[in-house]
Amino acid sequence: MDALVSQMNPVETTQRWLDAFEAAVSANDIDAAVGLFLPDGHWRDILAFTWNIETANGAGEIEGLLRRTLAKVQPRNLHIPHHRTPPRIVNRAGRDCIEAIVGFDTSVGKADGILRLVPDPDQPSQSKAWIMATALDEIRGHEELIGERRPGGQEYARQYGADNWLDLRNKARKYTDREPAVLVIGAGQAGLTVSARLTVLGVDTLLVDRFARIGDNWRHRYHSLTLHNEVWVNDLPYMPFPPNWPVYIPKDKLANWFESYAEAMELNVWTSTEMVSGSWDEAEKVWTITLRNVVDGSERVVKPRHVIYATGVSAIPIMPNLPGMDEFQGKIMHSGAYKTGKEWEGKKAIVVGTGTSGHDVAQELTTCGADVTLVQRSPTHVVSLKQAQRVYAAYFEGPPVRDNDLLATASPYPVLVKSFQLVTKSMLEEDKDLLAGLDGVGFKLDDGGEDRTGFQMMYLRHGGGYYFNVGASDMIIDGRIKLAHYDDMDTFVAEGMKMKDGSVIEADLLVTATGYKNLQDTVRMFMGDAIADRAGPVWGYGDGQELRNMWQRTPQPGLWFTAGSLAQCRIYSKYLALQIKACEAGLIER
């Protein structure tokens, strides 16, 4: 541990910094406020100052952010909340620091923050902010309808002869007498979490999904699927998983929970409903969305003020045009359509793609008795399942989920890069025997992307390119799953895949585990080029070092996106919902 940091009292040091910052901003002394940061410090703001998700790196950008926002925000009452994890000394991205959860008030409402303080290089007895993160927690006068603010139930309690609770719920779901303020497309974790957040904020929200039951987007995935991260990272807002749930949740168990969650949270859901088309009225600031019931073909037009795409990072499958693919006489499917390997027992299969889906499909087919060849197109980053959990280490350090969720927002992009580089280097060392085994059989390995930041940054940047080993790597090493390389392929023929050496790998089944298109393409499909082009690309990092168009206002008014893991959806659904509530309250424009 850094000797200077170890000599600092976390509580006293934090409070001194807060007092100094509050004195500076109260006096509108921006130079003094900026001087409390390291020259290369960072400030990530989520709605509290900017009504945006925005990162300022270095003194110049921090000064600019303050000059733009300080007069309107009027931060005050900066303090250490007594009910949160107290300030403590930790190591983040290889640097010892004091880490503190803080609270403050603004002209809009209550806000939270994270401070990471280090000794002032010029005056080691004093501290400076290496990182500050600020996040709006609630809008004054528009707080969540939970806890003390929960509904009293008078509208249906003992009103004999009147509508009871079920009558009112059924009427609310039908939307026969009103338009929804928000239409959410997709009832996976992204759609459910943002719908729940909006509902408890009192924003009228309709959630639609093309499947017959909520949770079917998980039920219909391949038979053996379980989550690859541990249960305590994956709670949904307001309803944590029961304490007896398994560490790794099976897909069908999660699907059933989703269905229960929607009912318990009183979400207005139309299942078996797909979007047909959508257009935006610039003058009226409203959408015209045509929805279709996939069972009976009936259509309904709704006119929400907001549309949220919650169809996930993996929305439209990419079907590659492989040489000779039209000649192949076996069955062809994308991994997204793959269900089970039982029907392929005793048969031969080729799986193209060595990301997570490719490995999982190959492993299940092999386990079910198929003869499987996995075709590698490009180097793949492989991490053991145990090592993969290390990126969620903060959730095992003691603080409750609420505090850890706030901590998870507090790493600006440059710090994320450094942090993931360190943990990836360590994971590669821990997995060296596994990786040596794969290398020995000719599997091409990627050591963590272009800057060795590992699987988490590969996911955030590109949505894939890695595999958590849950057994497929071992099968490749011992030969139970055969390995071929795309570069060695000549063409597909009727009976299988012909290689450049003239041999043919026979197959009855071809599974293409070749990824998905960008969410912008989903918008293009249903809303046309003009809206898709105006909105821009979704996911991946843009020039501002934040995920593009995720959980925040987009260049297309009234259009929003949410996607990601259960943890990401839990965390950022709150901030997306707060922005929509602010739009509805007239605090910001769409």
Image: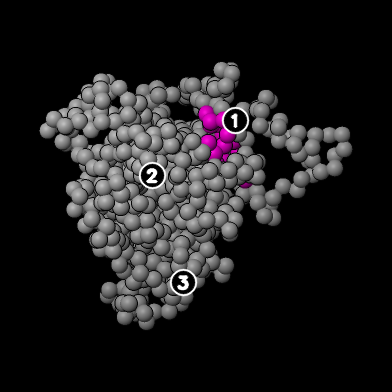
Q: Position of residue 460 (x, y in %)?
A: 34, 47
Magenta run includes residue 199? yes
Q: Residue 504 in magenta?
A: no
Can you say whether 450 is above or below 308 in the image?
Answer: below
Label 1 neighbourhood size at 10 Å, few (<14), some (14-19), many (20+)? Answer: many
Pointer 2 and pointer 3: residues touching (CB < 8 Å)?
Answer: no
**Residue ID at (32%, 77%):** 1
Q: Which residue is mark 2?
A: 367
Q: Observer-nearest residue: 500 or 261? A: 500
Disc nearest the viewer among 1 and 3: 1
x then y, percent, for residue 62: 34, 56
Is 504 positioned to the left or the right of 310 in the image? Answer: left
- Is residue 495 something one can see in this rendering? yes
Amino acid carrying label 1: it is Trp
In the rendered image, the vertical position of residue 345 relative to residue 478, given as above or below: above
For label 3, the residue is 87
The amino acid type found where label 2 is placed reads Thr
Q: Residue furthest right?
A: 160
| Magenta residue span | 192-216
Nearest to N terminus: mark 1 or mark 3:
3
Is the C-beta separation of discs 1 and 3 under 8 Å? Answer: no
Q: Give above or below for 546 relative to 79.
A: above
Q: Specify the label residue 270 is tagged with.
A: 1
Residue name at image x 39 percent, y 30 percent? 316
Q: Secondary structure at mark 1?
A: strand
